[in-house]
Structure formats: C-alpha cells, structure tokens
Amino acid sequence: MQAVTFSRYGGPEVLELAEVADPVAGAGRIRVRVLAAGVNFYDAKVRSGLFSGGREPAHPLVPGLEAAGIVDQVGPGVTGTAVGEAVFGLATGGAAAGLAVLTAWAPQPATLSPVQAGGLAVVAETAVRCLDLLDVGPGDRLLVHGAAGGVGQAAVQLAGLRGALVVGTARPANHPLLARYGALATSYGEGMPGRVRELFGSPTHVLDTAGTQLDDLLALAPAPERVVSIANFAAGEHGARVTSGGGDAAAALAEVAELAATGRFSLEVAATFGFEQAAQAHRLVESRTVAGKIVLVA
C-alpha cells in the first residue's frame, strides 16, 4: 500500500509517499481502508524526533493517530462491527496510509462526511477524557484556553451539553465560531484573567489546550488541581494535572458519535490536503494558526 512515511527525523520535508507493507488487524483491532486521516500537532512532534532519544528511525515510519474509513479486516475477538462498515477511530500510529489498524472506533455518523470523521477521534477522546477528569457538570463554569482548536471546540460543545457555562480564549477572528457553539469568548494575552472574570466570574474549572499563560490559569482556578492541561507538561510541577491518555477511548468515541448523529456535535475542518501534500499539512499544523482540524484525504 501507499503511505506517508519518513525515514529520518526533521522538518516536514522529510515526509514522502512510499510503498509499505499492508498492516494486519491483530486481536481486538480492525483494519480500515482509509478515506481520511487527521493531522495532529503530536504527529509533527514525532516526525521532528522529539521522542527519539537522538536515534534515527530503524525503518520508515508512518504518522497518523486517527482515521475514517471502511472496515476491510476484523481481528480476533472483535464483535459489533463487520467488513464494509464505515467507521472512525484511533490508531497507535500509521493512519496516514491506504490501510490503517484502529484500536478504538465507532460507526461514522451519517451527519458527518468521511473528512469530518477523519479528524474527529483524537479531539473527541481527548475532550471527553479532560472533562471527565475535571468532573464538569451542571452549573460549573469552565474556561477553555485555546478554544478554537480541535480539542477546544469539542470541549466547548461537550461541556455545554453537560450543563456548564463556558468561556473560551481564542483569537478575535475565531470568537464568532465559539459563539456558534454556545461559548462566551475572549482573547489571549495580557489582561485575560480580568476579561474572563468580567464574562462569568471566576471559573470553577480550567482546561488548557494551548500551553500558555499557566500562571494566569492557575490564578483563575479555585485550586491548582482544577486545571487540566494537554499542552504544558510543566503544569504538573505547579499542582495542575497533565493528561495525554488513559481514558476509555471506545466509550468516548461512541458518546461523540451519538451526539453528532443527532446534530448536537459538529467539527470544523480548517483545511484538507492529499496524502502527497502531507508536508504542507504538517507545516500548517505546526503554525498553530488554524481553527479546527487539518485532514489528509486519500
């Protein structure tokens, strides 16, 4: 099969299309014929060698943590799905390819295109996990820092459905987007805490998806443990909680799929690229300038 690959760590220019062996669905997993695959900032970190320990790859690597596609192989022990079903889900890597193995998945809602579903799994799982960690519920006041990105958009919608009042920080150009999702909006930067308090008082919970202004976020929260960050790994040193996994992914995907199917959840796709344009997609995701998801289309 063809896949986006890299054989050395570096900038987006190391990405290329190449032939690689077809993956096989192991126990508890499924394989899909990929229609669309989301591009996440984590993919760029892996490609850059951030987690490599200074060693070059022993073999070509395929990036990608999420995809939407058609099931074409079901691994041992899998129930509830069958060859031919349209699904979206999470991979441990290798989603930017003609075929990908998923570790958690849900049926693709008819209300979403494959492109939208291709960028849904990571933000859905992450947002549900973070809101569960914070135990956000009716009457809470949630501040989402970095609300226009994929995870931020998902968290804004899901927190509102849980009965919380939400303020999101974003660039002014993205404030109308947050308003469509039911959030109050303000800007990053100097004076942000005061602007937040003017909108809804002090937040009861804070979700940080941007990784900036940690001191301000801690000052706004009633206690450090009421701050959860997915973007600032130093936050734990100050009493906040940092999360990068560990939730019930299958349940999270099922929850968001049901909401999307009934029109209560949507996802903005900021840009799409062909697999042969993966380098451009990585450059854009690294710019941190877009609202919504970047998706590769097969």
Image (cartoon, rainbow, N blue to C red):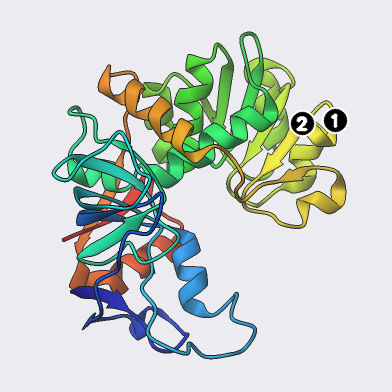
Q: Is residue 206 left or right of residue 267?
A: right
> Which percent across, then down, holds residue 17?
22, 80
Q: Quadrant of residue 261?
A: top left
Q: Is residue 135 above or below residue 175?
A: above
Q: Is residue 271 left or right of residue 298?
A: right
The residue that disc 1 covers is 223
Kind of residue indicated by mark 1: Ala
Q: Is residue 149 in view from this perspective?
A: no
Separation of marks 2 and 1 at Cα, in angstroms: 5 Å
* Label 2 close to label 1 by CB (< 8 Å): yes
Q: Nearer the viewer, residue 143 or 295?
A: 295
- Residue at image coords 25%, 41%: 87
Instruction: Sort mark 2 into few (<14), some (14-19) or many (20+) by Cα contacts within 10 Å.
Output: many
- Residue at image coords 69%, 28%: 134
Q: Quadrant of residue 105?
A: top left
The residue that disc 2 covers is 226
Instruction: Sort mark 1 into few (<14), some (14-19) or many (20+) by Cα contacts within 10 Å.
Output: some
Q: Is residue 87 left or right of residue 84?
A: right
Element class at badge 1: loop
> Which percent across, then down, holds residue 157?
45, 24
